[in-house]
Image (cartoon, grey):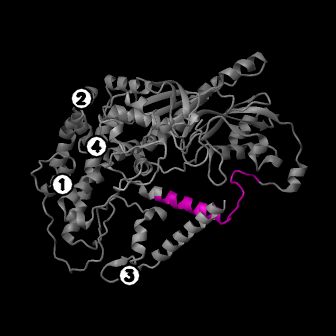
Amino acid sequence: MRSHFLFRQSLRRQISYIHGNIRSIHSTPSNGYLFSPVARPLLQRSFLVGVKHLPWTITPEELRDQKKLVASIKEGIWVETNGDKRDRNERSEQVKRRKLDNGEEVVTPIYATEFSKEDIENEERRPKKKVAVLIGYSGTGYKGMQLSTTEKTIEGDLFSAFVAAGAISKANAADPKKSSFVRCARTDKGVHAAGNVVSLKMIVEDSDIIEKINEKLTSQIRVWDIIQVNKSFSSYQMCDSRIYEYLIPSHCFLPPHPSTFLGGKLVELAEKHGDLEAYKARQEEVATFWADFDERVMRPVLEGLPEDIRKPVEKALHLGSDEDEVPQVESAKTDGKTTSDEGVSATEPSSENTPAEPGLDDGQAAYRKRLYEAVKAVKAAILKGRREYRIPAARLTRIQEALNKYVGTRNFYNYTIQKTFKDPSARRHIKTFNLNTEPIIINGTEWLSLKVHGQSFMMHQIRKMVAMATLVVRCGCDPERIPETYGPTRLAIPKAPGLGLLLERPVFDAYNKKAVESGKKAISFETSTKEMDEFKQREIYDRIFREEEESHAFASFFNHIDHFPQDEFLYITSAGIAAATTFPEKGAKGDSTASGQKSQKDALKQIEIESEDERGAEEEG
């Protein structure tokens, strides 16, 4: 304990030292703001203070260098930046930890309802019964299912509604533990549930208690039924298994574009390892997709661009000849004043009243503006092409072949966090993992439904399973790569967007058999099927489709993987696990390697769409 205290104290002094040097910034007329010689190297070790991730830009330096300009345009076309959100979350967590370490701000949990001592003493005592509460919810805008003292969660709103409806006494209104509150399945931030169960002791004398509770809830959370159970019942312990659904656009199974880092490596390594013919066979039904797309969709867009804009964009897309030179940008005469080399964000480039840019003359600023407009047109064309894609039957068969590799009892330590290869709790049993072979089309985008039935799941397990199976299919990988992930080598398997995941329902077969025999009601969602289907369509499916149309989370997720310029994800190629940056499970460390490559943890952080708090309970349910 003493050594731990000294370490924390030392770390605080280092951070204070860095912050002090950051404040030593001074201004110069010619270069704007500069860091002092002491602060500069400290800021380079930015993992201690957080890194500021800027939106995509074209810098003056890139305008002057052909290769850098092409690389920048490629990034602007394919890669969506999400660093600002991640940076905000990291800073917020640092502030929270610092306040806790300093003993500050010990506040009442946000779900707690405070009553005066007099109100509690005067409340009529009413009998409580142990019950199972059947619920459904849309996780959008919530920090997950599990109670949090400071964050808005499903359980927090649910518990507050129980209190407001009189189902929990005023004496127990601030502490769910007093009511033996237990969840069946924990879901992550943004994850939905058509059916879930919580068990607790409640006051259920009122015949209209369900209506009273629902009146206190938002439309995103519904109580389907309240079923009386025996005193020893626990919704977590008594649950036999759980069924989850994952919705994903079919265009996610398209291969990486040949111009991307991963797209190039797939062919290169297949040829190098003598797997080229087998690789082509696995990609047969999509072999010409990008070539046809480039000719049918991209070529008309590019032909409408001026030559000085078209050539660098073609190079970024690998459509131009290698001999073509990117035209140099002619500088216009200016007053010669330059103060900065920072670029302007191209996330939403303004088409009017663009101010003069320090470090750019008028000609360069105009050229960059036209490049922004060209990149925007190219990205719109790519998005349109993806949405028009319709998956062939052969591709659906390959998806099911990949999903079948998860069925059975497996060591899924590579599909979660904070588990080791030898941890027995990482072994989980998957009953079925099936693809619905009849896609649905919503607003022009084709969607697929995957359903997995398992005894229990670890944190992020389903999302990582979906991501791995999708990578196997889209990259033309041998499906046998999935069983290899159960071995002792730690791999960086990313988690697919939480947007598409929902808990369909938990299963209580063993309990129900005994309950029916003893004259009690079985825990089943069948009596609420109609209401649940309407709720699922309105509050879950429609939200998923609408959010994807606005955010393009799936396309962005796979774009980040395709463009990640290191070998952490090359286990998906014909070169196998040996091609990726890996380490044996025993003695593994998360630090960056001496060559400057990012650790697996950092690699995952770079490509995953959301920055989530991965501390706390490990069970997803």
- Of residues 63 and 575, the one nearer the viewer is 575
State how far apart marks 4 and 3 are (Cα): 44 Å
Position of 519 with respect to 588 (left or right) is right
In the image, which disc is placed on residue 382? 4
Q: Which residue was labeled with disc 3?
A: 27
Position above or below: 564 against 414: below
Sequence-first disc among 4 and 2? 2
Sequence-first disc among 4 and 1? 1
Q: Nearer the viewer, mark 3 or mark 2?
A: 2
Mark 3 lies on a secondary structure that is strand
Q: Is residue 167 visible?
A: no
Sequence-first disc among 3 and 2? 3
Task: Residue type at mark 1: give it.
Answer: Pro
Q: In which quadrant will I find the N terminus?
A: bottom right
State how far apart marks 4 and 2 are (Cα): 23 Å
Q: Is residue 361 visible?
A: yes
Residue 557 found in image quarter: top left
Q: Residue at x 79, y 27 (%)?
A: 230
Task: Residue type at mark 4: give it.
Answer: Ile
